[in-house]
Image: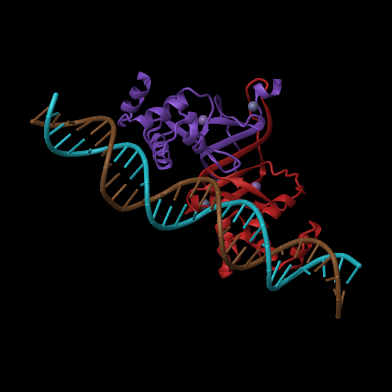
Chain colours: A red, B purple, C cyan, D brown
Amino acid sequence: MDNRISDILRRNRLSVTESRQKILNLFLSNTGALAHADIEHKAGERFDRVTVYRTLQAFVEKGILHTIPTADNSIKYALCKNDCFEGHHHDNHIHFVCSKCGKTECLDDFIIPAVKLPKNYIANNIEIVVNGVCNNCRKN
Amino acid sequence: MDNRISDILRRNRLSVTESRQKILNLFLSNTGALAHADIEHKAGERFDRVTVYRTLQAFVEKGILHTIPTADNSIKYALCKNDCFEGHHHDNHIHFVCSKCGKTECLDDFIIPAVKLPKNYIANNIEIVVNGVCNNCRKN
DNA sequence: AATTATCTTGCAACATAGTTGCAAAATAAT
DNA sequence: ATTATTTTGCAACTATGTTGCAAGATAATT
Ligand SMILES: [Mn+2]
Ligand SMILES: [Mn+2]
Ligand SMILES: [Zn+2]
Ligand SMILES: [Zn+2]
């Protein structure tokens, strides 16, 4: 399999195994976020449910993937772009869910704006999920 | 039970039953959002799981409650303040989750700001959930 | 107020999502 | 090549959510 993939795994001190390579490959060769179920079935390949759970969990811990909470209460996973590492995520960008094609995207260049809060409230993390119609679906 | 409660139910064309009154009362006498589990056990009272699901669902449909998606992928429910009605919610405010006391609040007066999106993207709905420390917990 | 019609509830049974312990298999270290 | 460590898959389990249906409660009608 791709060399880049085993590099990423080794860099994060994860032993390179077949399922980790295949699951990571799904994210690298896919734009958009994936749900657990997507991964479990993807491409005819079938991984054990438990392995998928543990792999996603490991990837999130290591800062390879981040989670996206969506309105329908299903977690999606997407690649971290740059400066995330073990236990320290910096994925402060807007997420977009298209109601036509269902795709969930990271809008990596669209920074979370400052939000006003009541007096003495402290913000640590701000999640913004926009639901709407993406460029592609608007045209068709 | 409180008169106001049966009024709300009748106004929404819901027959006034004991469980609906008790569950609605929980929200009226409680600041902050409640999760399904909170409601199921609340105050020694025990309602059947199925009844709680169906009641919450009915209240959301009627515009009495709205849902709040949280980062840990658990839905919370909170009262709609004003102009929500059957199938048309207008709860476009910020939600705040305190990481100390765990309380989830509707910041009803804190309007969702406009967010920049890529060209040709259309926003229909914007969810903002802020995680941090509330006024109360900051002082202690 | 009594009867009838409609709606709601609780139970059982089911479906799906997620977790844990453990032996076997795979990977990494020596 | 051998040993040590990590990961996997299975089974068994818990938690969460859904559906059909008969019995009970509420609302409408007389
Ligand atoms: Mn993202
Ligand atoms: Mn709210
Ligand atoms: Zn789209
Ligand atoms: Zn607090």
Q: Is residue B72 visible?
A: yes
Q: Name the residue: 63% across, 22% down.
A: A118
Q: Is residue A100 left or right of residue D22?
A: right
User: How many discs appear?
Assistant: 0
Q: Position of residue A14 (x, y in %)?
A: 77, 60
In front of the other: A80 or C22: C22
Residue A81 in view of the camera:
no
Image quarter of the N terminus of chain A: bottom right
The residue located at (66%, 37%) in the rendering is: A112
Q: Position of residue A41 (x, y in %)?
A: 55, 64
Please state if B1 lies on the left or on the right of B77 as rendered.
left
Quadrant position of residue B72: top right
Pinpoint residue D18: horizontal percent, then vertical percent. 41, 49
Which residue sits at x=63%, y=25%? Answer: A117
Q: Is residue C1 left or right of residue A40?
A: left
x%, y% of residue D22? 26, 48
Left/right placement of residue B128 relative to residue B82 reads right
Q: In percent of the image, x 39 and y 36: which residue is there?
A: B55
- C16 over B118 or under it: above or below: below
Give A31 or B52, whichever is nearer the viewer. B52
Would you place residue A56 above or below residue B124 in this image? Answer: below
